[in-house]
Amino acid sequence: NAGVTQTPKFRILKIGQSMTLQCTQDMNHNYMYWYRQDPGMGLKLIYYSVGAGITDKGEVPNGYNVSRSTTEDFPLRLELAAPSQTSVYFCASSYGGQGWDEKLFFGSGTQLSVL
Amino acid sequence: AQTVTQSQPEMSVQEAETVTLSCTYDTSESDYYLFWYKQPPSRQMILVIRQEAYKQQNATENRFSVNFQKAAKSFSLKISDSQLGDAAMYFCAYRSANNNNDMRFGAGTRLTVKP
């Protein structure tokens, strides 16, 4: 089972460049999330989506954009990359239920450096 | 806003011994869920154990158990019979029962297991 797949695994950007982090899941999950993990910090939610065509901001959305045209894919776009966006980015998905056993499935992360 | 605090940046345990990782959280809600996630060097986030706030009984998953003290807002993780494969970053996380789109993570505890 592939689960949640993120590409690329590593990337170096120059200040002002743009890029798209890809995320796809094959579990037919409704909910998808983008988190960033800074050194010594926990994960912070950037954007999330509750279904195709529906997205919303999380805790730290500035400098990012997302789209959700299909259930499977949830790309994260960085426009005008800045050093503050150097981080490890995680995509996650879940079925979307409200129950206590709702589980997040994570991708393996993308390490991004902006120099 | 809910916050999650892990006061131990690093912990060390001898193989086969027991170790407890601490987590406290701040919330005004009465219904919520708590989680421990493991992040090995592969960066993949793996759910270790979860607890419903309205359940007084502490959750247990094989060698992993929690000590949930709702009044004290404390949620510690006990790992018994530690194994080399337990070495990882461990993140405590909180999620409101009313909003499954907002998982709050602590800064993590790096666990080292000595052979």
Image: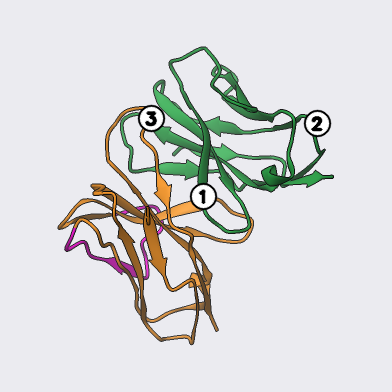
Chain colours: A orange, B green
Q: Amino acid at mark 3?
A: Asp
Q: Position of residue A83 (x, y in %)?
A: 52, 77
Closer-to-camera residue (B49/A65): B49
Mark 3, residue position? A101
Residue tagged by mark 1? B45
Horizontal arrangement in the rendering, residue B5 relative to residue A62 (left or right): right
Q: CA distance from mark 3 to mark 2?
A: 29 Å
Q: Amino acid at mark 2?
A: Glu
Q: Is residue A70 left or right of residue B76?
A: left
**Spatial CA span between label 1 and label 3:** 16 Å
Q: Nearer the viewer, mark 3 or mark 2?
A: 2
Q: Height in image: A72 above or below B101? A: below
- Asked which secondary structure carries label 2, the reply is loop
Amino acid at dot 1: Met
Q: Position of residue A13 (x, y in %)?
A: 48, 83
Q: Nearest the camera: B77 or B53?
A: B77
Magenta stretch secondary structure, dominant: loop
What residue does disc 2 label?
Answer: B17
Determine the CA span between mark 1 and mark 2: 24 Å
Residue A63 in the magenta stretch? The answer is: yes
Where's residue B69, x and y in %? 59, 18
